[in-house]
Image: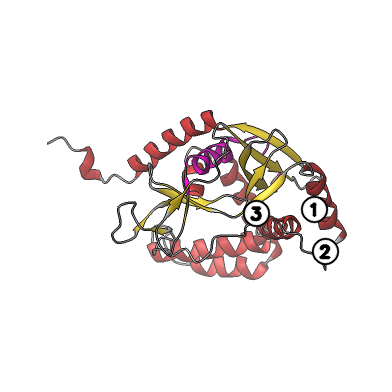
Amino acid sequence: MIGPTKDIPRDRYDRPKIIPVDGGNPVGYTRMSTLAKVLDDKGNLVDWKARMTAVGLLKSPALMTRLSGLLAGSSLDDPKIKQAMKKVVDEATEAAGASNAASTGTGLHALTEALDAGHPLEYVSKADRDRVDAYAEATRDYTPLRAEGFVVIDEIRAAGSYDRLWLCPDGKVRVGDLKTGAWDARYPMGVTAQLAGYAHGKHYDPATGGREDLHPDLDIHSGLLISMPPSGGCEVIELDLDLGWAVLMVATKIHEIRKLNAGAYRAN
């Protein structure tokens, strides 16, 4: 299995800097993960962060004291107070364990990648071993061809890395994404759009700016969601990338509209 593409330069907004097809200075491309989230309803995320903040404040009386001090004789409209309160909120969500799921997801991505590359897995907990074993069982008929391949979609000036390129039992090659959250399989719009973008893109060489097709047998019409929820088990779900591409086009348009300034809306 070919390993990850590394050393992608970034701009100050953490966007990958890509050499244009016809050459010239690198320009910032939108991250595919950013576009995939444009159409997501943030209501559940806002509610979740509010719960985490409340729990974190209860767990850390020191943060409550700090918050009280900030608000003493201050206005909630003061920009400095707003910024200071944001730091308290971030620390409260951290105290509530908000980063645990992200850390677990990062670790499981690394473990499954090592497994697919044929490396022995050492120092793995029983719980993580069970999840990795479920992954191995679910993907036993799929051959990983590449991990973390970096892709550019010049048509929409977006870029990002897929998790795997899979040779599937039917002989076709498909892009795949590993998700370890509880809700990814129930709400797959974002990952479907993301995979559609990768399938329509090209591998990118950051040293030369060269592009090449992902694979001659690539199926651009379907992709794979590898769902490893915290409840256990693992499932390979085939997603409709034709629908995903249509969703991505809408997301791209909305992303561009959101970047307009007030002057753009004034009639000449």
Q: Which element type, helix, strand or loop, lies under badge 3?
A: helix
In the rendered view, would you say 240 is above or below 225? above
Q: Are marks 1 and 2 in contact (CB under 8 Å)?
A: yes
Q: Callout 2, which amino acid?
A: Val
- 191 up-or-down from 89: above or below: above
Q: Position of residue 78 (x, y in %)?
A: 38, 62
Nearer the viewer's eye, disc 3 or disc 2?
A: 2
Q: Which quarter of the figure has residue 75? A: bottom left
Distance between mark 3 and mark 2 Cα atoms: 28 Å
Q: Earlier in the sequence, mark 3 or mark 2?
A: 3
**Label 1 vs 3, first from the N-terminus:** 3
Query: Which residue position holds label 3?
Result: 52
Spatial separation of the CA atoms under disc 1 and disc 3: 28 Å
Bin the neighbour count of mark 3 within 10 Å (Cα to Cα): few under 14, some 14-19, many 20 and up.
many
Q: Which residues are magenta?
A: 182-202
What amino acid is labelled 3 in the image? Met
The residue that appears at 28% across and 59% down in the rendered structure is 24
Quarter of the image that includes the C terminus:
top left
Q: CA distance from mark 1 to mark 2?
A: 10 Å
Q: Secondary structure at mark 2?
A: loop
Of circles 1 and 3, the one toward us is 1
| Residue at the disc numbered 2 | 124
Regarding mark 1 in the picture, which secondary structure is present there? helix
Hey, what amino acid is under mark 1?
Answer: Val
Which residue is at the front of the view, 155 or 212?
212
Q: Residues within 10 Å of mark 2 (few under 14, many from 20)?
A: few
Say whether residue 17 is left or right of residue 25. right
In-front residue for pair 125/45: 125
User: Which of 48/214 is in front?
Assistant: 214
